[in-house]
Image (cartoon, rainbow, N blue to C red):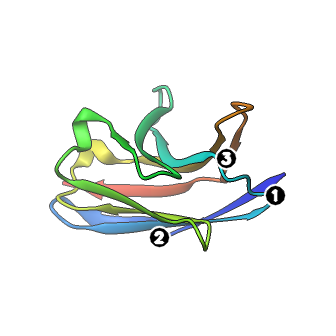
Amino acid sequence: QVQLVESGGGLVQAGGSLRLSCAASGTIVSLNTMGWYRQAPGKKRELVASMSNGGSTNYADSVKGRFTISRDNAKHTVDLQMNSLRPEDTAVYYCNHHRTLTRYDYWGQGTQVTVSS
């Protein structure tokens, strides 16, 4: 089992910045990908950004150049720096821990990000 605890959501004006953090605990296997997904009201959950334990990254086109993902493998943490936020970034953001070999996903409880225009 893996537990994920998120922090850092909130309310910000358009053009502002927020930083989300997620800490994983429990049984952490070496081969994994950690990342962030988001879900806006009435929409499907979508990938925002992810990073493998080897450092490979994947970003949604809508956030490229604005968001940066980073992780600390030793501390089992993943952060998402969000700059130039837009109202359409408003959503609940979920931390994800994906075990590469078993393809099993763990999810955080979600943190609300609201960007006002």
* Figure label count: 3
Front label number (2 vs 1) = 1
Label whose residue precedes the other's in the sequence (2 or 3): 2
Which residue has dot 2 on it? 8
**Left or right relative to 48: residue 84:** left
Q: Regarding mark 3 in the picture, which secondary structure is present there?
A: strand
Q: Regarding mark 2 in the picture, which secondary structure is present there?
A: loop
Residue 112 position, x and y percent, is 49, 56
Tag 3: residue type? Trp
* Residue at left offset 42%, top offset 52%: 55
Tag 2: residue type? Gly
Label whose residue precedes the other's in the sequence (3 or 1): 1
Which residue has dot 3 on it? 107
**Left or right relative to 63: residue 92:** right
Camera-nearest residue between 23 and 30:
30
Camera-nearest residue between 58 and 44:
58
Camera-nearest residue between 66 and 50:
50
Tag 1: residue type? Thr
| Label 3, label 1: how far apart the Cα atoms are | 14 Å
Which residue has dot 1 on it? 27
| Label 2, label 1: how far apart the Cα atoms are | 24 Å
Q: Are marks 2 and 1 in contact (CB under 8 Å)?
A: no
Residue 21 position, x and y percent, is 50, 67
